[in-house]
């Protein structure tokens, strides 16, 4: 008996194709007999193809359907599709195990297109340890692969009156984490812990975990640019002010600034500078604020060698400094 049906016809398991006549032997279920059809009939005249004995489909308007029972009557791993070709063709060629090349035409509107779509349904009472939508597990026994890309996003070819409004290389929707106890948009557990390589982020340099630049192994996040180029990290909340932490071009200072300019900086000599310049006598902002207490301070501040704690006594109007193991003051007049 055949192991697959095609609109009432079935390909015979192990049957040979008659290449000279360009015909394929099939089983005609309606006539319970073997017949031969041409490849063109197989491709064009028989629009729905089933492999397996279940004869059902979980998809809409599918043409090639694998519908079978993967049960304990067999053993080992199973695969619905396998490209087991032996590629020996000479010349500078390309080979693709799957190639999506459909054409959309006419005047209709479409909701979406997916070159590959994964949507299995798990209803087992057991546990599936790992679910992979995509696995790259190549084996290289001889020769050299110059560049190994597990995932490549190329520039779309836009021509004529075509256009793209929004383009996303990798996109995580707002409900990405729903249903998961722990959710990570990206997870990197590799030994090299490299996150980005070479290309810039918005023209400002590298950002990530341990780039190929020589840095201490204890550094988890690094922002890097070449000498003479500013290195900047921005914090921003929609509708509110932003803050930039920046090493200016050709400088060793760390500067914190917002839309109006520099607010605070430190340099390699330990100098700490507040604000971006002088304030007017009538100014209401732009000051250095020091903690105050009501009365003479009595606590022993945490020790930082070579530095002194300051506090304002608001009750007695004094400035206190903790020096050489005790509080010293001066009156404010």
Image (cartoon, grey):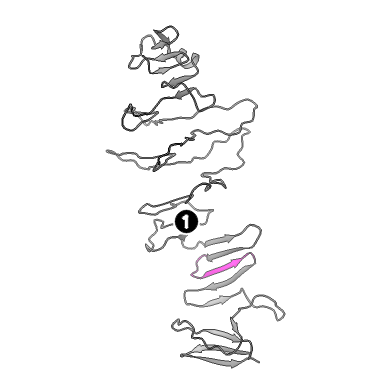
- Residue at 38%, 42% in the rendered image: 148
Label 1: how many Cα within 10 Å (few below 14, some 14–19, many 20+): many
Identify the residue under disc 1: 206
Image quadrant containing the N terminus = top left
Residue 122 percent across, percent down from the top left: 46, 37
Indicate the position of residue 147 as horizontal and vertical percent values: 38, 43
Q: Position of residue 32 (x, y in %)?
A: 41, 8
Element under disc 1: strand
- Dividing the picture into quarters, in which one does residue 277 lie? bottom right
Q: Quadrant of residue 107?
A: top right
Q: Nearer the viewer, residue 173 or 71?
A: 71
Q: Which residue occupies the foreground of this view, 57 or 115?
A: 57
**Residue at the limit of the structure toward the right, as seen here:** 282
Q: Which residues lie in the magenta part?
A: 248-259
| Foreground pick, 280 / 42 | 42
Pinpoint residue 57: horizontal percent, then vertical percent.
49, 25
Q: Residue furthest left?
A: 142
């Amino acid at each position: 008996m055949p192991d697959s049906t095609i609109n009432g016809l079935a390909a015979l398991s192990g049957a040979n194709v008659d290449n000279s006549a360009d015909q394929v032997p099939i089983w005609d279920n309606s006539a319970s007999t073997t017949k031969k059809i041409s490849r063109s009939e197989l491709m064009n005249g028989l629009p729905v193809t089933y492999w397996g004995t279940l004869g059902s489909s979980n998809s809409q308007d599918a043409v090639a359907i694998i519908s079978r029972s993967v049960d304990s009557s067999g053993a080992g791993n199973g695969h619905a599709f396998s490209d087991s070709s032996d590629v020996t063709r000479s010349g500078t060629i390309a080979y693709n195990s799957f190639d999506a090349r459909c054409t959309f035409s006419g005047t209709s509107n479409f909701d979406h297109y997916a070159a590959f779509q994964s949507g299995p349904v798990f209803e087992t009472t057991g546990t599936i340890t790992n679910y992979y939508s995509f696995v790259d597990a190549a084996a290289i026994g001889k020769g050299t692969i110059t560049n190994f890309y597990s995932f490549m996003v190329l520039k779309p070819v836009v021509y004529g009156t075509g256009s793209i409004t929004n383009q996303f290389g990798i996109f995580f929707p707002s409900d990405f984490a729903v249903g998961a106890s722990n959710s990570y948009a990206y997870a990197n557990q590799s030994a090299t812990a490299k996150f980005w390589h070479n290309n810039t982020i918005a023209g400002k340099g590298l950002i990530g975990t341990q780039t190929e630049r020589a840095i201490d192994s204890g550094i988890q996040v690094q922002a890097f640019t070449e000498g003479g180029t500013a290195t900047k990290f921005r914090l921003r909340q929609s509708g509110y002010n932003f803050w930039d932490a920046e090493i200016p071009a050709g400088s060793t200072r760390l500067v914190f600034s917002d839309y109006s300019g520099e607010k605070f900086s430190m340099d390699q000599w330990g100098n700490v500078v507040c604000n971006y310049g002088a304030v007017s006598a009538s100014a209401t902002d732009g000051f250095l604020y020091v903690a105050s207490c009501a009365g003479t301070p009595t606590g022993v501040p945490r020790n930082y060698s070579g530095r002194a704690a300051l506090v304002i006594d608001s009750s007695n109007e004094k400035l206190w400094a903790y020096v050489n193991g005790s509080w010293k003051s001066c009156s404010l007049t």
